[in-house]
Image (cartoon, coloured by chain):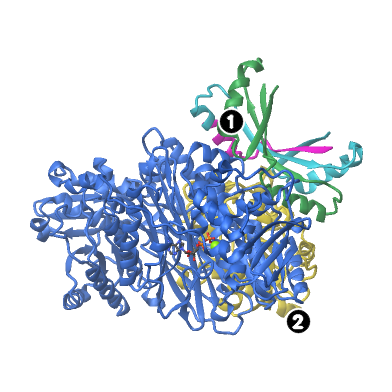
Chain colours: A green, B blue, C yellow, D cyan
């Protein structure tokens, strides 16, 4: 079983990396694409098969250390 | 006026940190009620951060003139000092304390970005950075884990920004003390180089000249950050700011810097100003005020990142890496060409007028119309009440009688070297690129850093073959424990120590930039600390002929746990005439003689140099006692004598005695040269202090007392007599205390003898912060 | 002999490299902007350090698509010498002109300090004049300098004698403590099969003058200049 | 419509960040968790509603620039 976590910059926060990648893609000829956002992806191996045991722990970990709640949002699934 | 604007109520005025009297003054200036946008504009411009309303009378007492000063304190974004041969340097320090408390990485990063912009705004090429940091304790205590996170975040934020921009971060200081818990200090300094004729001005000159906005689009980030910095740090104020964290983009800044320098070389620019604190508001009204003109801008032309931004938000945003450029009419194409070359966004957003007013329109409708000068220069000024703090009575009453004489000074030295305040800061500076730009002659790790300036240190457009090399020394210092225990004396010592560090490197001071980090000025005891500190700084800067060229005030540094220790950080910049005079702190050759310049102990100091010392703090958890005194005359003759010796080629190493006293300084001279990764150069010393045992009265005071005005030098054996005799003639005590050599440090004082293997001392000193950070 | 120093947005060791070429070695050189697409008249290319495109996405990932890189590719195919320093090394790997990749330092921290390097082979334009057995002392300054390649690639590099420099201690021993970033096999620099394209993480241009504490870096530039002289003479 | 791209370090590649996060989680008391891997997440806004038009372009971008095949794998969805 794995927790799969996606951490993204908050909407209101500047994402210079996303902007730079967007410009690069446009210059390479990928015309018409919209905004790009770059975040983090984490995969955590978990023992057992019962997702529920882990849900609140993973949520806590996301909040406390895996993301920076001041500038990032996160979401996750356990599967 | 936009329909959605809230009504101006007394409550709203209060939320904007404006007093009823200030609000009346605003109404007087406008001859009517302000609009919501105008209220926001006044609130940031009249915040302490932008207007210095509580500190201006004090700042006026600083010495600010010397024949070398080309642009003085308060005139522009940064002061400019002549260094000869048509060259000049621009430098300044700035705080980013509250933003770093909220988001350490981005807060510190944007602090670096802000000060770099202040420098290239002057037309100078930024060539080095330094920083001064304070955190709560990182080793033990309830908050240690949090403090480590703040410390780690701040350091990587500074590294991220400076490294990517490509500026060597070559000096700094870091202290840990409970008073900074939850209110860390992050002071960032930048220095740039230019030719005299390249000085750019932040003035909106020339009626009809177009006003350009360059750099990334404006978002809601850092909304009203200047106001945030101008009140106590509380959970509530931090919470508000968290919603609007500024994110730095050093990549963008590098491009903006190169493009601006390239543009300034074309002569198409009438005025230029960065958008720092208070963003578009500050840059428009200040440029107009300086030039005595007016300015008119249309907000719908301002590039915007977020949809639906109100005029209030656009004017108060502190989005980073933006510049305001006043272009000479008819030269617009040059701006476009250069900014397009660098793929940078630009927009023409308005023009200079002759009305003396700052007029802001949004889709044609006027949303603000304010006399620029009154807004920028006529903020209220307050003489705050001051009262000597009550705690000072206990400080003065404290005596050494209550502290048992050390039973194991050998162990004390080891503990002091490992104490985070004294331990090597390599954990910090190895994360900073300090060798980029090919000019770092003395890297972090010696008393002062030294950089060389060469032709490519200059901005473009100065190709005239005069590639004279110059050597600039830099240091930033402040022992805030001393300042807490005696603000006047402590502030003097901050300057004296900085000047001493420069002297040890072989440099003559050129100028000072200071950052006044204090608590809430409405508290009379805290304001007294500020007032007394400024008195000490002013006196010492005058004394060392190091005029203040600018600086920054950061008040309201207090968390619910109380105020920080008063921390007037002092950055001094000096000039070294010849490359041969550049001197470092570590011992060089076996057999050299070790000489102490200065008094071994101040016999008139009842605390024997232990008041406020690292020894009392680190080993006894006591921050008390009257700190050592600094006799400025004595200090100055020490510096002059030392520099004279250096210029005669007599000195192989020079290291000043500061925290931890003689013993720590000696140990550092043995262990602080780092050849390469994992490869220190350790060189021993045999010291005999027996001659001073009686004077010192206590062994621990002799070893760890922090009597001021002392430097340890090493000289070739043949030069000993010359140095000692000449020093005496010049009125500086000098005594040979030992010899360089061997694989250990040995120290004899009467019957007592201490002996330390160098590898062990080095490990304790070099690795202790890394160990604390791994906890 | 004409050196080109490439300039990408946020290159920041470009001036340093040109300074060494012009003022230390006394050779001619000029900047070449990333939007240019020709290297006409150029005899050697230096891709300098820095944070091209902010190092966003991956180091060197965006720079490799700059127009000038197509010209560099053609230049290299014709045997022209190309030296990538730090970010330049990263760009060359991303561009496929050198094998492998540079990933985050194992410490996860940026590192700026001096290191010792063992020159593994003198069979290259960049190392042929370095005295045998001499340990070089050069500064590094990078956050992503951990050299990675899969095992077959590493074997091939060794077999072809294409590892130019390895992190070592002051005696030339390849220790873990001497390795500042976790690079596999302590690799600090490599070259391509034809041996005319090389990359390294340390900064020779920051160690080419006595006043900066080391002149070891100069050996690399001097070696390149000497080799070029031979190449140009042959062509003439 | 968005392309959602996940880029992960190849199995053989050192992932010191994953290891560090794993240690940090264990130290904070999240006992029993297994290996952690840290990768990148990219979101690209795309115009239109027909995922098929974009699929091969996004795949190309992933292959050419958004990931480095020497050290990374990628996968994506358009939705
Ligand atoms: N502590 C200080 N000592 C000397 N000058 C100061 C000090 N604090 C501020 N100043 C001067 O006051 C002026 C206005 O402050 P400034 O820092 O320019 O505001 P901003 O934050 O907008 O850049 C500057 O010239 C600055 O150098
Ligand atoms: Mg300013």
Instruction: Give the Cα separation between the discs numbered 2 and 1.
Output: 67 Å
Q: Quadrant of residue B67?
A: bottom left
Q: Chain under label 2? A: C
Residue A63, labelled with which disc? 1
Q: Position of residue C222 (x, y in %)?
A: 59, 73
Q: Chain under label 1? A: A
Instruction: Please indicate, yes or no, whether residue C162 appears anywhere in the rendered image.
Output: no
| C91 to the left or right of B682 | right
Q: Verify whether residue D7 appears in magenta.
A: yes
Callout 2: CB less than 8 Å from ligand 2: no
Specify few, some or many for label 1: CA neighbours under 10 Å numbering under 14, 14-19, or 20 or more: some
| B17 to the left or right of B319 | left
Q: Image quadrant for the C terminus of chain C?
A: bottom right
Residue at x 52% of width, y 27% of height: D26
Q: Nearer the viewer, mark 2 or mark 1?
A: 1
Q: Is residue A64 above or below residue C41?
A: above
Callout 1: CB less than 8 Å from ligand 1: no
Q: Which residue is mark 2?
A: C236
- Residues rendered magenta in the picture: D1-23
């Amino acid at each position: 079983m794995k927790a799969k976590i996606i951490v993204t910059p908050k909407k209101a926060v500047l994402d210079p990396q996303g902007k730079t990648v967007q410009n690069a893609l446009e210059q390479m000829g990928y015309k018409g694409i919209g905004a790009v956002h770059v975040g983090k992806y984490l995969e955590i191996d978990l023992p057992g098969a019962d997702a529920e045991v882990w849900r609140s722990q993973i949520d806590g970990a996301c909040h406390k250390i895996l993301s920076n709640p001041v500038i990032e949002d996160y979401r996750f699934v356990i599967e | 006026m936009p329909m959605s604007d809230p009504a101006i109520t007394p409550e709203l005025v209060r939320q904007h940190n404006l007093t009823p009297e200030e609000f009346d003054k605003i109404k007087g200036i406008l001859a009517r009620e302000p609009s919501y946008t105008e209220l926001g504009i006044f609130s940031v411009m009249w915040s302490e951060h932008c207007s210095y309303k509580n500190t201006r009378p004090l700042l006026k007492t600083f010495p600010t003139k010397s024949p070398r000063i080309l642009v003085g304190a308060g005139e522009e974004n940064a002061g400019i000092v002549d260094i000869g041969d048509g060259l000049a340097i621009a430098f300044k320090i700035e705080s980013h304390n509250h933003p770093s408390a909220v988001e350490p990485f981005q807060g510190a990063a944007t602090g670096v970005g802000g000060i770099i912009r202040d420098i290239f705004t002057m037309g100078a090429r930024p060539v080095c950075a330094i920083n001064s940091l304070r955190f709560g304790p990182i080793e033990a205590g309830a908050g240690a884990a949090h403090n480590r996170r703040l410390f780690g975040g701040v350091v990587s934020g500074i590294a991220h920004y400076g490294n990517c921009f490509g500026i060597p971060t070559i000096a700094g200081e870091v202290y840990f003390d409970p008073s900074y818990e939850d209110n860390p200090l992050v002071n960032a300094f930048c220095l740039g180089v230019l030719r005299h004729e390249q000085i750019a001005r932040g003035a909106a000159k020339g009626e009809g000249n177009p006003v350009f906005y360059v750099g990334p689009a404006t978002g809601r980030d850092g909304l009203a950050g200047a106001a945030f910095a101008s009140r106590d740090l509380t959970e509530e104020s931090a919470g508000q700011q968290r919603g609007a964290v500024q994110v730095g983009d050093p990549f963008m800044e590098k491009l903006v810097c190169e493009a601006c320098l390239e543009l300034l070389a074309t002569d198409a620019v009438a005025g230029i100003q960065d958008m720092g604190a208070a963003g578009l508001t500050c840059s428009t009204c200040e440029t107009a005020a300086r030039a005595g003109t007016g300015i008119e801008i249309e907000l719908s032309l301002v590039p915007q990142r977020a949809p639906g931004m109100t005029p209030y938000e656009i004017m108060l945003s502190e989005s980073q890496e933006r510049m305001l450029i006043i272009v000479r009419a008819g030269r617009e194409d040059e701006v476009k060409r250069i900014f397009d070359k660098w793929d940078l966004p630009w927009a023409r957003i308005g023009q200079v007028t002759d009305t003396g007013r700052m007029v802001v329109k949004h889709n044609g409708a006027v949303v603000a119309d304010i006399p620029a000068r009154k807004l920028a220069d006529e903020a209220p000024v307050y003489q705050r009440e001051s009262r000597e703090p009550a705690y000072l009575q206990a400080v003065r009453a404290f005596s050494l009688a209550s502290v048992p004489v050390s039973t194991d000074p050998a162990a004390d030295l080891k503990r002091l070297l490992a104490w985070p305040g004294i331990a090597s800061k390599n954990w910090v500076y190895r994360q900073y690129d300090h060798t980029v730009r090919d000019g770092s002659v003395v890297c972090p790790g010696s008393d002062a850093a030294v950089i060389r300036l060469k032709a490519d240190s200059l901005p473009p457009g100065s190709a005239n073959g005069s590639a004279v090399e110059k050597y600039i020394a830099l240091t930033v210092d402040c022992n805030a424990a001393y300042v807490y225990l005696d603000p006047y004396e402590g502030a003097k010592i901050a300057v004296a120590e900085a000047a001493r560090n420069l002297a040890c490197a072989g440099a003559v001071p050129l100028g000072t930039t200071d950052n006044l980090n204090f608590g809430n000025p409405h508290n009379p005891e805290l304001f007294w600390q500020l007032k007394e500190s400024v008195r000490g700084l002013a006196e010492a800067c005058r004394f060392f002929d190091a005029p203040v060229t600018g600086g920054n005030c950061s008040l309201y540094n207090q968390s619910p746990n109380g105020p920080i220790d008063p921390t007037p950080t002092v950055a001094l910049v000096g000039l070294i005439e010849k490359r041969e005079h550049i001197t470092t702190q570590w011992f060089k050759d076996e057999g050299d003689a070790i000489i102490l310049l200065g008094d071994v102990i101040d016999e008139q100091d009842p605390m024997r140099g232990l008041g406020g010392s690292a020894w009392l703090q680190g080993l006894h958890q006591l921050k008390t006692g009257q700190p050592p005194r600094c006799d400025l005359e004595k200090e100055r003759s020490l510096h002059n004598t030392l520099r004279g010796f250096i210029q005669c080629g007599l000195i192989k190493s020079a290291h000043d005695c500061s925290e931890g006293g003689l013993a720590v300084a000696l140990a550092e001279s043995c262990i602080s040269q780092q050849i390469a990764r994992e490869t220190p150069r350790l060189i021993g010393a045999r010291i005999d202090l027996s001659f001073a045992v009686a004077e010192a009265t206590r062994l621990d005071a002799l070893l760890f007392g922090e009597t001021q005005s002392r430097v340890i030098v090493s000289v070739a054996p043949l030069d000993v007599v010359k140095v000692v005799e000449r020093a005496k003639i010049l009125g500086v005590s000098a005594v040979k205390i030992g010899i360089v050599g061997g694989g250990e440090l040995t120290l004899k004082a009467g019957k007592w003898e201490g002996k330390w293997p160098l590898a062990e001392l080095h490990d304790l000193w070099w690795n202790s912060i890394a160990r604390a950070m791994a906890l | 002999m004409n050196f080109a120093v490439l300039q990408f947005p946020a290159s920041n060791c470009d001036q340093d490299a040109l300074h060494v070429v012009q003022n230390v070695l006394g050779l001619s050189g000029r900047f070449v902007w990333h939007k240019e697409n020709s290297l006409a008249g150029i005899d050697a290319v230096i891709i300098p350090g820095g944070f091209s495109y902010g190092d966003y996405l991956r180091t060197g990932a965006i720079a490799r698509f700059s127009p000038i890189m197509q010209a560099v590719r053609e230049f290299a195919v014709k045997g022209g010498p190309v030296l990538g320093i730090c970010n330049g090394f990263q760009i060359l790997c991303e561009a496929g002109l050198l094998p492998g990749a540079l990933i985050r330092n194992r410490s996860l921290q940026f590192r700026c300090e001096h290191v010792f390097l063992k020159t593994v082979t003198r069979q290259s334009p960049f190392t042929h004049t370095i005295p045998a057995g001499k340990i070089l002392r050069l500064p590094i300054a990078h956050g992503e300098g951990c050299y990675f390649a899969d095992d077959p690639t590493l074997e091939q590099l060794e077999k072809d004698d294409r590892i130019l420099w390895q992190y070592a201690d002051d005696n030339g021993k390849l220790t873990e403590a001497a390795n500042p970033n976790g690079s596999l096999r302590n690799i600090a620099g490599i070259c391509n099969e034809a041996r005319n394209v090389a990359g390294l993480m340390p900064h020779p241009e920051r160690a080419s003058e006595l006043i900066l504490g080391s002149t070891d870096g100069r050996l690399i530039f001097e070696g390149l200049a000497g080799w070029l002289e031979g190449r140009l003479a042959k062509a003439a």
